[in-house]
Amino acid sequence: MLHAEGPLLSIDLTERTVETENVDDVLESFIGGRGLATALAHDRIPFDADPLGPENRLYLATGPMQLSRMSFTGRMNATGLSPLTGGLASSNAGGFLSRNFAGAGYSAVEITGESDELLVAHVTDEGIEFEETPDLEGAEVPAVTDYLRDSHGLGAEHIAAIGPAGENLVRFASIMTSESRAFGRGGLGAVLGSKNLKAITFDGESHPEIEIDPVQMEVHGEASQSDHIMKRQGTTSVTDLANEVNGMPTRFFSEQQFEGIEGINGDAVESKKFKKGTCSSCAFACKLPTKDEERGVETEGPEFETVMAFGSNCAVDDVVSVMQSNELCDRLGLDTISCGNTVAAYLASEGRFGDSELIHETVERIAHREGIGDALAEGIARVHDELDVPNWTVKNLDFAAHEGRTLHGQGLAYAVANRGGDHMYSTFYAWEYPLVDKEDAFPQGGFEKKPPAVAKQENARALEDCGVICRFSRGMMNPERYEALFGADYEALLEVGARVVELERHFNNERGFDREDDELPYELPGIEEAISEYYEVRGWNDDGTVPDEAVGEHAIADD
């Protein structure tokens, strides 16, 4: 089975030491990316660790496809104990960092301990350098990029950095790369902030040599020739559809349609797009560089989730306002989904929906933990009582845009996902809008046949994250192409994904998570039976825990 190559690099920030370790056995079992990082985290992060303490560890990892020339492979993975959810969380980001990471010669980097000074760590194929950078305290992400470009000749594509939000331990702070791409959900930027690591850079020419099937160029060619609407509108192409099916969270989830949708939909975003945008080696080019000269804003995005969080959920019908919110979050290092939803909760408490000036002021206050921003920086689950608003989260992670009250399979997916209210964990919404062929689709309501389908899609998404392959390859990647690229039967590859999901669940079980945490803040008829069926499909106990013997079986790949 094809897998990533290279040792694990462990960086101890407390002692400022490094060591390398052969992890071929883990790579052979888990391919790379999220799988490699999850297996390492499960074994190395204490189950009782404080997410913001030195015992937490952050893993950055690539997969074998970062050594290919195929479209949809300009991504990499980050994994750690989430300050927002308290459970294990993985996030991945696009852009151009992954191939520079691979060039340094490592399959994964592990960051442990905490520094007593603000640091930048420079990782190359010739060694590691620690640089004390007190002058970068409080710096926004573009300022970090400017410093590293001027002082080290490193462009944004070499850098993973945090902004003020990460330094101030905002529980939904992002790690930013290429300035506008985020390891967004779960607050892993706060983990770097707790370790006093402002940025980590990667450079080198020591890419491992592996043989990848020529089918990679077939995928690349199809990506280039595709006339998919995402090439014009990115993920915002689904905005009108979501609104039409009563699936657009509005006014802090109190409504499901937004009357001002035309001001923030795909056409509105496309009208502000001024050039193409892409990730490393990708011909699909679905990114959204946008600009409004009148108000002096230039950003990349907003994507659909940001349009929901800072648009309909805040009752804002002005796409330029949403662009401004997006740009603020990128500069300050904030997850746009959690930040927008938290701001929406604040607007609900103040009766100030639609107030763009207050929205932008509040984003700044959150990043710097000033005034009300200090409480909001804790996230909706921890502040909703103070605001006297509902707790629209699962496992403390607030919802993405795809509405589980309309798309019931996605509602089930939110409930059981180890990360909480995260749409990317299974992407089951695509089978219910639907965005797939009708013969593969499910009706929007009810749970018939959906629990095993949710489990299968979770496994498939985990496999992509091991690869690492972009979600938007859907339609161009099929089982036959996976088998050709990875040199293994597709069902065996899905089993790798299943093991990743199971290790995440077991880790969270050891931290006290069980069925009570697989709970939605709204009622769906039949959801409890669907959750039980999902557990049965997984071979888990009906209390949502993984049998100990299953972890032993699934942690190691079959010979």
Image (cartoon, rainbow, N blue to C red):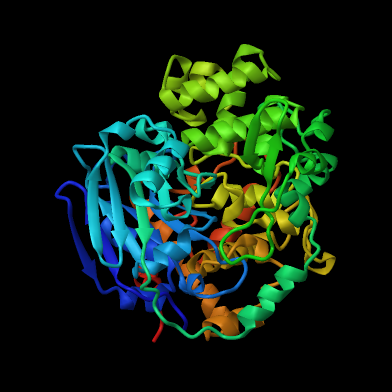
Q: Quadrant of residue 290?
A: top right
Number of callouts? 0
How far from the left and from the top, in percent, is residue 357? 63, 17
Which residue extends farthest left? 15
Quick check: can you spot residue 253?
no
Quadrant (top left, top right, bottom left, bottom right) of the C terminus: bottom left
How far from the left and from the top, in percent, is residue 33? 44, 65
Which residue: 51% across, 58% down? 96
Closer to the camera in the image, 35 or 159? 159
Q: Quadrant of residue 303?
A: top right
Q: Say left or right for 66 vs 358.
A: left
Closer to the camera in the image, 539 or 136? 136
Q: Say left or right for 414 vs 446.
A: left
Quick check: can you spot residue 462?
yes
Closer to the camera in the image, 99 or 527? 99
Which residue: 14% across, 49% down? 15
User: Would you place residue 306 above or below residue 477 in this image?
Assistant: above
How far from the left and from the top, in percent, is residue 70? 60, 73
User: Would you place residue 232 above or below residue 263 in this image?
Assistant: below
User: Would you place residue 32 above or below residue 141 in this image?
Assistant: below
How far from the left and from the top, in percent, is residue 111? 28, 53
Which residue: 77% across, 70% down? 225
Q: Quadrant of residue 533?
A: bottom right
